[in-house]
Image (cartoon, rainbow, N blue to C red):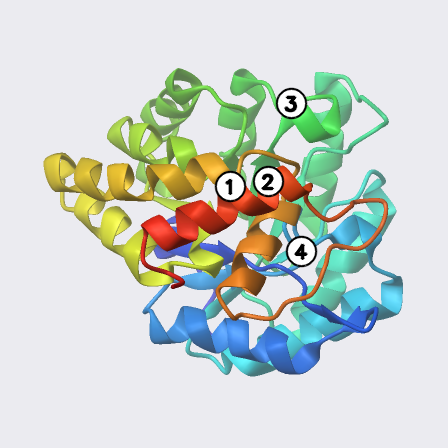
Amino acid sequence: MRKQIKAGDLKGVWTALVTPFKRGRVDHGMMSDLVRLAGDAGLTGVVPLGSTGESAALTGGERESVMSGVIKAAGGGLRVMVGAGTNNTPGTMENTARAADLGADAVLVVAPYYNKPTPEGLKRHFLTLADASRLPIVLYHIPSRCGVGIPLDLVTELAKHPRIIGIKEAGGDPHRSGEIARLTGSGFAVLSGDDPLTLPLMAVGAVGVISVISNLVPKKTRRMIDLCLSDDFNRARRVHRELAPLLNALSLETNPAPIKEAMNQAGIKVGRVRPPLAPVRPETRRAIRRTLMQLGLIE
């Protein structure tokens, strides 16, 4: 068993892995290829079973097979942070325990969706999980999908727990992310959860990103993050501007439909999204194609 990771180990790029499908089933061969792509680019780790991985559309058996397959493909060379969050505490605890059994390095735990718990409910949920967990926990703040966010003062309180080591910030507020970094210090890591905002979030204290775009351009994503971590924001800004057309195209419809379309067009055959999501509209498909051609990713 590897040494348990800490906040400082979260620095860099984590790919929020898409879940590839082939004829309606999880394509485990392609999933392994995606993990190798991240490893070849020297990324910090991969995150299966998040929003980008369509975790809400997978069966329990599929979740288990994805988790196991990704951890096996990572082979100890890449960190694996498993999306374990659900909208009920016992279910999240079960997912976290299973991730530990299979050899994950950490779990990503979203605020319980649909239930809309109060801050006290959120506090009890996360602390109950942290007290029982054998793995470090990264909180996931994405109020647009959950209907509720994790308040700033609660984040700083939860950060005092030894097994809560960071937060994925996808709430669209760089100032909030900067305040979390300022108030929690080096023992707690802020990660961007929104590729278009990664540069400004790192300027105010984030140490990396859980990235959608790195499914397609992992080396360039890592280049920008490395420059930010070296405080070379002038050159990092140039990389961000190179990526901006792709970031815009991937924001035209609900994630992960656009990134899957872009990957398919670029020859990384990950299949379509699963219902209730739908493939991108023809105009979005054309916009993605124009962008990929502009960036030289396809002819």
What amino acid type is highlighted by mark number 4?
Answer: Gly
Determine crowd level at label 1: few under 14, some 14-19, many 20+ residues with C-alpha closer than 10 A.
some
- According to the picture, the residue beneath numbered tag 2 turns out to be 284
The reply to whether callout 3 and callout 1 are in contact (CB within 8 Å) is no
Q: Which mark is residue 245?
A: none
Spatial separation of the CA atoms under disc 4 and disc 1: 23 Å
The reply to whether callout 2 and callout 1 are in contact (CB within 8 Å) is yes
Helix, strand or loop for disc 1: helix
- According to the picture, the residue beneath numbered tag 3 turns out to be 149
Q: Which mark is residue 287?
A: 1
Q: Position of residue 33 (x, y in %)?
A: 53, 78
Q: Nearer the viewer, mark 3 or mark 1?
A: 1
Q: Which mark is residue 53?
A: 4
* Residue 188 appears in the picture as rendered: no
The reply to whether callout 4 and callout 1 are in contact (CB within 8 Å) is no
In the rendered view, would you say 253 is above or below 220? above
**Between 229 and 91, which is closer to the camera in this rendering?**
229
Dot 4 or dot 2: first in sequence order is 4
What amino acid type is highlighted by mark number 3?
Answer: Gly
Spatial separation of the CA atoms under disc 3 and disc 1: 32 Å
Q: Nearer the viewer, mark 4 or mark 2?
A: 2
At 70% from the left and 33% from the top, the residue drawn is 111
